[in-house]
Structure formats: C-alpha cells, structure tokens
Image (cartoon, rainbow, N blue to C red):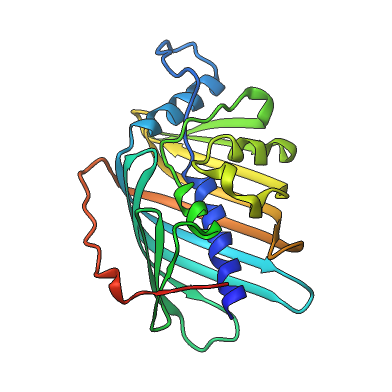
Amino acid sequence: MKKKLFCLLAAMMMVFGLAACGGDKDGSSGDSGKSDFDAFMEVQEKMQDIKDMEFKMNLDLDINLSETEKMSTTMTGTCKEIIKSKDDVQMEMDYNMSIPGMDEKMDEKLYLKDGVVYIDMDGQKLKVDSSSEMASMAKAVDTNAMLDISKEMISDLQVKTEGSDTVYSFKMDPTKAIDYFKSNANAYEDLTVLDDVTFDRMNVAVTADDKQMVKSMDMDCVMIAKVAGDQDMNVSYKLSVDFVSINTDLTIDFPDFSKYQELTV
C-alpha cells in the first residue's frame, strides 16, 4: 500500500511540476507584428509575476508498475498556492480521487509547507520528511520558474482566438521535454528518482486573456520513469487547470501538523 501511495504521489508531483512551470527569455516585444512564438513567450513571461493563485484542476491518471500492478484514477480538486520565494512555495490542495476497486471516492487534503508534504488520506494524517525524494519533488513546483524554451523544443504551434482570449497549442519534442523540465524545476537536480524519465508525448494548450495572462492549461502526456530501484513506472495523464484567481493576496490556514506521522516507503 505504501509503495502504491508513494508512486501515486510521485506521479502527481511530476504532473504538477510540469503544469506549473512558466517563463520566457524575452517577452518585452509589444508590437503587433511579433510572431506567434513571441506572443506565447509573453504569456510565459507574465507567469513570472504570479505570487499567489487559486485554481481548479481535473486529472485522469494511469500508472502501470507491472502487468499486475496498475492504478487508474480520476482526480478533481482546488488548490491554493503561495510563492514567497524560489525556495519557499506553500500549497493547500483539496481533492477527491476515484479509483477502480473502491466503492467510494477518496476525499483528501494535501499541504506543502517548509518543504514538507502533509497528507490527510483515508483517515490518516501523514507527512513526508523534507529530506525525502517526495518532498524534494514537491519543492520543484514553482509556478513562476524561468524556462529556457526555444523554438526547436516545440512543433506545430497553433494560435487561435476565442472572443477576447487567445489559445496557444503545441507539441513538445519528446527528446527535449525532460531537459526542459529538469533545467527549470526547483531542486530537480537532487531528484535521482527521475533521472531516467523519458517521454512518449507531451501536448500542451494554454489559454490567455486579453492581457496575455494565463487562464487555463491542458496537457496530454505519456512518460516512463524509474522508481523504487530499477522498476519502470509508466504514467499517462490528461490534466486541465483553470485559474480562479491570480495575485489576490491569498492566505492558507495551515492545521497543527504535530499529529501527522512520518510516511516511510
């Protein structure tokens, strides 16, 4: 049970680590003749200004550890995230998961504070020590991370307007997707559990408002990672994120964490 829980949480953190990234090398261009790529980079640059946000998400996640160890889940929820600094990200996430074989949905809560992950799961209060791979992965969730993305990393960039919104959709080169993530996720260099991650596909769609601030993200991804030694974890997911608010001076009412017990895997 603990190994499955670890793999599920690890996959969730990989998903949100990828979905949360945003940045740009040069988004200062304001003339109407800028390219589609430059316009998309302006959206990414504006994400650097995000200090707090609340969003809704829906995740369809399939994890295959072996022919007999498979997990499929649908997860929906809301999240508050506060970015005090590059190394200080706080989070509160309320979510429910529907897992085949279980009669009821699991209504859970996850916190991230001072680099430690706390989980209220199925009546248990658990924490993951800040020195663990899981907590390091959580610290990699940095919404205003600076990305060194280039035109060579993506293909089939398409831009369309929907009312006052603009939708940018593209495919990430599978051979470069992991480098894109590793070079921009906080603390990622310490995550040896993901050294052998490979991607089969990574398709992304981003919707921005008339001020080029992100409104939603959709991702369709398939990847393979080594976990628990040399065991392969095949992960495929479809993730949708809708931003409810950005930079509204959010606060998080953290509970007393003294009753949370250490999770060992």
Q: Residue at x 33, y 31 (%)?
A: 49
Q: Is residue 92 left or right of residue 194?
A: left
Q: Residue at x 47, y 35 (%)?
A: 22
Q: Residue at x 76, y 61 (%)?
A: 230
* Residue 217, position as x, y percentages in the image: 48, 45
- Residue 108 image-quadrant placement: bottom left
* Residue 205, position as x, y percentages in the image: 54, 41
Seen in the picture, residue 14 relative to 203 is either above or below; the reply is below
* Residue 11, position as x, y percentages in the image: 58, 60
Closer to the camera in the image, 172 or 17? 17
* Residue 91, position as x, y percentages in the image: 35, 55
Extreme residue toward the right, this view: 67
The quarter of the picture where the C terminus appears is bottom right
Extreme residue toward the bottom, this view: 103
Q: Is residue 157 left or right of residue 19?
A: right
Q: Residue at x 69, y 53 (%)?
A: 223
Closer to the camera in the image, 204 or 176? 176
The quarter of the picture where the N terminus appears is bottom right
Q: Is residue 175 left or right of residue 42?
A: right
Seen in the picture, residue 77 relative to 124 is either above or below; the reply is above
